[in-house]
C-alpha cells in the first residue's frame, strides 16, 4: 500500500500539483527516487536519511521507491525534502495513515531534522488553498504563506519531530500570522536636482501614464539622478499589484520574514547582465530583472553597453507584459509589466558633437554608438529626452520650490483619472484607445503630418496618442488637443545621432 503526500512544482509563478508516492518494492535494498527530478531532488534521499537518523529512526532494509507524479513534469529544487520524508513516514507507520490527507507540503530538511526555509511559499499556499487543502511550510515561511488568505490552513513547524508530535497529538502547532506590510519609504527627492526642467517634466509625464523613458546626455548631467527619483513620485502598489509582485518575489526567494513591500520595485541591473539575467531562465529557471520589476521600474543605465541580444529580448515583454521562457520540455511564463527607464551618453566619448568637450568624430561616433540600440526597441520608448550638461549657473541656484511630494500629488491625480477610465494610458488599445484619445481636427492634422514625414511608425502613432492623453490628464483636460499632441511628438527622436533640435516638431516647423 502506497503512502501519498501532495506538494507542488513551480512553473513561473504558478504552482502545479505533484503527488509524492512512497511504496515498498521487491528487489535489492535501496532508496529510489523517480519522477524526472533534478540534482537537488535526487540529493533529497541523503538529506531525508540523515534527518531520520537525527530523530533516532532508521530506514528498514527493504527497497523503498518514491515516485513524483506526474512523471513527465520536471521537478526542481530542494522543497521536495519534506513531502518525501512525510510520505516515507506514512509508509513506515510513524504517522497515522489518514493524518496527511488534505495537506500539501514544501520544505527543505537539514541533517539534524530541522525544516529549512524555501522559496515559493506564497504561490504554494495559494495553490493548496485552491485545491481545498492546507499546507505545511517551514516555520520561517509561515508569515509569508499566511498571506494566502484567512481560509487557508497552514502549519509552520520548526522541525520534523515537532510536526510528528503535532500529528500524534503530543503537541499543537498554532497557525502563523501574516507578516507586516512595509509602506513605501521616502527616497531621494526631486529637490536635489537643479536645472533640467525639461527632463523633470518628462519624468512627471512618464510617471503619470506609466510610459517608457530614455534620457540622452553627457556624463554628469543628472540622468541616473533623475531616474532614481522616479519611485518617489509613483503611487504605492494597489492590493492586486502587491499580490502579483509578491508572488514573483516569493518564487525568487526575496520575501524576508513574510514582509510585503508596497513600494514599487526599482531594479537597476549592471550592463554586463546576460539575457537570462534580464528576462529569466538559466539552468534552473528563475525570474529575470524584468519580472522582478513587475509593476515597477526597470532602469537600464548605459543602455548601449548592454549586449544587443539581451536588449532585444526585452522587446516582447515591453509589449505583452510577460516573459515566456521556452524549453524543450517546458514553457514557463513570468509577469513583466514594467516601466522601462534608460539612460545613455550621446556617443562613446560621452559628450557628443556639441558644446564643451565635443567629440571630434561626430556625428559618425554618435551614429555608431547609439546604433547599438535597435530601432524597434527605441520605437517602444515613448519619451526620448535630451539632457544637457548642468551649468555653473544651475548649480548656484537655490533648491527648487517643488519637490517629489508636489509632483507625486499631480501624478496621483492623473492616475485617478486613468483608473476611472479602466487602465493606465500606456496600456490603452483598441476601442478604449480610440475613445480616450479622440482628436479634434487640428490635433489629427498634426499627427497626420508627423506620420507622413516619416517620423512615426504605426506603433509610434499609438504611443504618441497615449502620451498625449497623459499630458491632457495632467492638465485635467477632458479631450486631447493639438497642444497635447505637439508636446507628445516633441518627445520622440528621429533616430540615433539626431540632434536636439531635429525632432518632429522642428522638422514640421511647428
Image (cartoon, grey):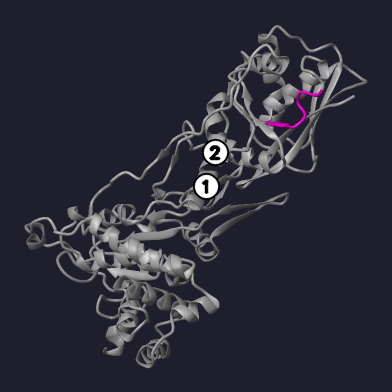
For mark 2, does the 10 Å Cα neighbourhood hold few (<14), some (14 to 19), or many (20 or more) residues?
A: many
Q: Position of residue 116 (x, y in %)?
A: 58, 24
Dominant SS in magenta: loop
Compute the Cα span from label 1 to label 2.
9 Å
- For mark 1, does the 10 Å Cα neighbourhood hold few (<14), some (14 to 19), or many (20 or more) residues? some
Q: Is residue 130 above or below residue 496?
A: above
Viewer-proximal residue among 213 and 378: 213
Q: Where in the figure is residue 272, as x and y percent of width and height?
A: 42, 49
Of 203 and 242, which appears nearest the observer? 242
Discs 1, 2 touching: Cβ within 8 Å: yes
Image quadrant in which the N terminus is located: top right
Residue 223 visible in the current orientation: yes
Q: Is residue 145 above or below residue 507?
A: above
Q: Check if residue 189 falls in the magenta segment.
A: no
As drawn, the label of residue 147 is: 2
Q: At 67% across and 40% down in the image, what residue appears?
A: 129
Q: Which residue is painted at 59% across and 25% down in the image?
A: 156
In the image, residue 104 lies at what x, y percent? 70, 32
Does residue 189 appear left or right of residue 478 in this picture? Answer: left
In this rendered view, identify the residue nearer to me: 434 or 277.
434
What residue is pinned by disc 1?
A: 243
Residue 203 visible, this angle: no
**Label 1 element class:** helix
Q: Residue at x 12, y 55 (%)?
A: 399
Q: Which residues are magenta?
A: 98-105
Q: Is residue 110 above or below residue 258?
A: above
Residue positioned 31% across, 80% down in the render: 503
200 displayed left or right of 271:
left
Which residue is situated farthest in the right direction here? 26
Q: Quadrant of residue 381?
A: bottom left
Which is more N-terminal, label 2 or label 1?
Answer: 2
Amino acid at each position: 500500500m502506497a503512502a501519498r503526500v501532495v506538494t507542488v512544482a513551480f512553473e513561473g509563478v504558478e504552482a502545479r500539483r505533484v503527488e509524492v508516492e512512497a511504496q515498498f518494492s521487491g528487489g535489492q535494498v535501496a532508496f529510489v527516487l523517480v519522477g524526472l527530478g533534478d540534482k537537488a531532488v535526487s540529493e533529497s534521499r541523503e538529506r531525508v536519511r540523515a534527518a531520520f537518523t537525527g530523530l533516532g529512526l532508521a530506514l528498514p532494509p527493504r527497497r523503498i521507491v518514491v515516485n513524483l507524479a506526474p512523471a513527465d513534469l520536471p521537478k526542481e529544487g530542494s522543497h521536495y525534502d519534506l513531502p518525501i520524508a512525510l510520505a516515507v513516514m506514512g509508509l513506515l507507520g510513524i504517522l497515522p495513515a489518514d493524518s496527511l490527507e488534505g495537506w500539501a507540503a514544501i520544505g527543505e530538511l537539514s541533517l539534524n531534522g530541522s525544516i529549512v526555509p524555501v522559496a515559493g511559499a506564497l504561490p504554494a499556499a495559494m495553490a493548496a488553498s485552491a485545491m481545498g487543502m492546507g499546507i505545511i511550510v517551514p516555520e520561517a515561511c509561515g508569515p509569508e504563506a499566511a498571506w494566502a488568505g484567512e481560509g487557508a490552513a497552514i502549519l509552520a513547524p520548526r522541525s520534523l519531530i515537532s510536526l510528528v508530535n503535532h500529528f500524534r497529538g503530543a503537541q499543537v502547532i498554532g497557525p502563523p500570522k501574516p507578516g507586516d506590510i512595509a509602506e513605501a519609504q521616502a527616497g531621494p527627492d526631486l529637490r536635489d536636482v537643479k536645472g533640467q526642467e525639461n527632463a523633470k517634466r518628462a519624468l512627471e509625464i512618464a510617471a503619470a501614464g506609466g510610459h517608457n523613458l530614455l534620457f540622452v546626455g553627457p556624463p554628469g548631467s543628472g540622468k541616473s539622478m533623475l531616474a532614481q527619483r522616479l519611485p518617489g513620485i509613483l503611487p504605492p502598489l494597489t492590493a492586486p499589484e502587491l499580490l502579483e509582485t509578491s508572488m514573483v518575489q516569493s518564487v525568487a526567494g526575496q520575501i524576508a520574514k513574510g514582509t510585503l513591500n508596497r513600494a514599487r520595485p526599482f531594479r537597476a541591473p549592471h550592463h554586463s547582465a546576460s539575457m537570462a539575467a534580464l528576462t529569466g531562465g538559466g539552468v534552473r529557471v528563475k525570474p529575470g530583472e524584468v519580472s522582478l520589476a513587475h509593476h515597477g521600474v526597470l532602469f537600464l543605465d548605459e543602455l548601449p553597453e548592454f549586449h544587443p541580444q539581451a536588449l532585444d529580448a526585452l522587446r516582447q515583454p515591453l509589449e505583452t507584459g510577460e516573459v515566456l521562457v521556452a524549453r524543450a520540455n517546458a514553457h514557463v511564463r513570468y509577469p513583466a509589466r514594467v516601466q522601462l527607464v534608460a539612460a545613455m551618453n550621446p556617443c562613446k566619448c560621452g559628450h557628443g558633437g556639441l558644446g564643451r568637450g565635443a567629440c571630434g568624430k561626430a556625428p559618425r561616433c554618435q551614429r555608431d554608438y547609439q546604433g547599438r540600440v535597435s530601432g524597434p526597441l527605441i520605437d517602444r520608448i515613448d519619451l526620448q529626452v535630451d539632457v544637457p550638461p548642468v551649468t555653473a549657473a544651475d548649480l548656484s541656484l537655490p533648491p527648487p520650490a517643488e519637490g517629489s511630494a508636489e509632483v507625486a500629488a499631480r501624478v496621483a491625480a492623473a492616475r485617478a483619472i486613468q483608473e476611472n477610465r479602466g487602465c493606465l494610458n500606456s496600456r490603452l488599445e483598441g476601442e478604449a484607445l480610440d475613445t480616450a484619445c479622440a482628436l479634434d481636427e487640428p490635433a489629427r492634422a498634426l499627427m497626420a503630418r508627423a506620420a507622413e514625414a516619416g517620423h512615426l511608425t504605426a506603433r509610434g502613432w499609438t504611443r504618441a496618442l497615449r502620451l498625449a492623453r497623459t499630458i491632457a490628464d495632467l492638465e485635467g483636460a477632458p479631450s486631447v488637443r493639438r497642444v497635447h499632441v505637439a508636446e507628445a511628438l516633441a518627445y520622440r527622436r528621429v533616430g540615433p545621432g539626431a540632434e536636439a533640435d531635429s525632432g518632429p516638431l522642428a522638422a514640421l516647423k511647428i
